Image (cartoon, rainbow, N blue to C red):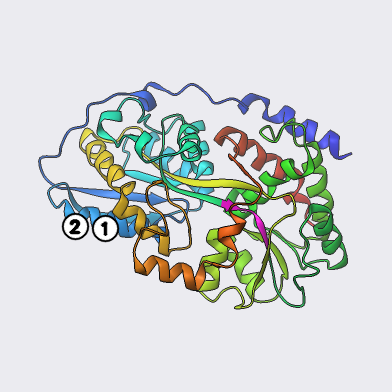
């Protein structure tokens, strides 16, 4: 029964399984022009980057460049809503958003609608030399954007398991099979957030093809047979899939859920905020596969030459050492700039890591298992569609 459902979903996705060729607008090489007077920027955040050090970096750039920027308007939106906002502006002939921040999900949805400017290699001379600030993992994440995003945040993210009483370290599930058995014995006490709106939910479904031994972990339409079957079975004991990581955290913190998959940034930031219980336990999967995560800065197609000029300057600042250091006290342990680490970013960062960064766990945990690149933006959109059609729409069945 389930196999046939996947086939139907796959057939429905055939028409959009490959990225469409960018339009002339998205590949234009308009020459950036320094504004004759300061301009206003509108920054749209679809991935939580403003709270993750992004706004502090932008504010610092604005303060240092009064000749370029007069003011900044900050906007936020769910990842699933970003493309609609930009499409409405593009269709109306007036692109008012200057810069978009978000993860591969946001990037993928904007690429499908051909709403982004291709920055690389066209504007490489206006951006940093990425070979000096990116290692192989960061470079692979950068390349996944096809030149339409600049990597501004990078994390060996997860997933792993957070748990709370009455679950203990001795009975916390650390394999998919053990998790399924635990969920069956404790219906309604396990869940994960909807992958399209959650970094932890996305990491959870992306790691399963590696752990379960699926035929092609990079191809959710045809290569995730075991994963989709497993998630279908697991869903029998899930009463709801929270619509965001924040809602998942609130349900976990309130005791409604006892076991959840999570990622480094959530484990740190939600404990710091007091949302997670102070004694939250943590365990890796026995066959740990880390799905790297990252966020991009993206320039909408159709911005003015003056906005383009300022955007490129701002992006260059955002990947610089000072801006990247600010991210290390917000819930991540790595940055988009390989030269910026928790060890060389000052006493404030070291104190933060000592208090919230589980120094008795993460340093060794990050050396464990295998590090995997996430799905391409296009494949990720396909995974979201299949998940919603076959898993999310039949909760508890």
Q: Dot 2: what SS?
A: helix
118 relative position to 381: left or right: left
Q: Which residue is drawn at 62% across and 48% down?
A: 290
Range shown magenta: 157-161
For image coordinates 78% across by 49% down, the residue present is 231
Q: Position of residue 242 (x, y in %)?
A: 65, 61
Q: What residue is shown at x 85% (from left), y 40% (from top)?
A: 2
Residue 286 visible: yes
For residue 263, say whether it is visible: no
| Mark drawn on residue 63 | 2
Numbered disc 1: secondary structure: helix
The residue that appears at 80% across and 58% down in the rendered structure is 179
Residue 70 in magenta? no
In magenta segment, residue 159:
yes
Say above or below: 257 vs 126. below
Cβ atoms at labels 1 and 2 below 8 Å apart: yes
Reply above or below: 1 against 323: above
Q: Mark 1 points at which residue?
A: 59
């Amino acid at each position: 029964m389930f196999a046939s459902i996947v086939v139907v979903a796959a057939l429905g996705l055939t028409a959009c399984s490959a990225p469409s060729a960018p339009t002339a607008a998205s590949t234009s090489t308009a020459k950036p022009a320094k504004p004759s007077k300061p301009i206003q920027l509108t920054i749209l955040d679809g991935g939580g980057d403003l709270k993750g050090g992004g706004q502090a970096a932008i504010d610092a750039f604005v303060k240092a460049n009064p000749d370029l920027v007069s003011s900044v308007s900050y906007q936020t939106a769910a990842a699933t809503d970003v493309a609609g906002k930009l499409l409405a502006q593009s269709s109306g002939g007036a692109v008012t958003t200057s810069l978009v921040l978000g993860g591969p999900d946001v990037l993928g949805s904007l690429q499908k609608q051909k709403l982004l400017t291709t920055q690389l290699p066209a504007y490489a001379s206006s951006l940093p030399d990425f070979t000096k600030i990116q290692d192989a993992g960061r470079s692979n994440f950068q390349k996944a954007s096809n030149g339409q995003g600049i990597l501004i945040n990078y994390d060996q993210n997860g997933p792993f398991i957070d748990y709370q009483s009455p679950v203990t370290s001795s009975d916390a599930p650390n394999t998919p099979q053990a998790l399924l058995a635990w969920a069956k014995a404790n219906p309604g006490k396990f869940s994960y957030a909807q992958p399209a709106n959650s970094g932890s939910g996305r990491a959870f479904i992306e790691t399963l093809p590696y752990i379960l031994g699926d035929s092609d972990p990079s191809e959710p339409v045809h290569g995730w047979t075991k994963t989709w079957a497993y998630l279908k079975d697991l869903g029998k004991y899930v009463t709801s899939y929270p619509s965001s990581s924040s809602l998942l955290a609130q349900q976990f913190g309130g005791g409604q859920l006892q076991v959840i998959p999570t990622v480094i940034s959530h484990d740190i930031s939600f404990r710091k905020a007091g949302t997670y219980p102070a004694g939250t336990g943590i365990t890796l999967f026995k066959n740990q596969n880390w799905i790297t995560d990252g966020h991009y800065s993206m320039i909408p197609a159709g911005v003015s030459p003056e906005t383009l000029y300022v955007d490129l300057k701002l992006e260059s600042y955002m990947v610089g050492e000072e801006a990247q250091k600010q991210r290390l006290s917000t819930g991540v342990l790595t940055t988009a700039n390989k030269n910026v680490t928790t060890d060389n970013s000052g006493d404030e960062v070291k104190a933060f890591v000592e208090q919230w960064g589980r120094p008795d766990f993460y340093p060794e945990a990050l050396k464990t298992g295998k590090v995997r690149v996430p799905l391409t933006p296009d494949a990720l959109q396909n995974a979201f569609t299949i998940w919603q059609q076959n898993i999310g729409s039949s909760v508890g069945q």
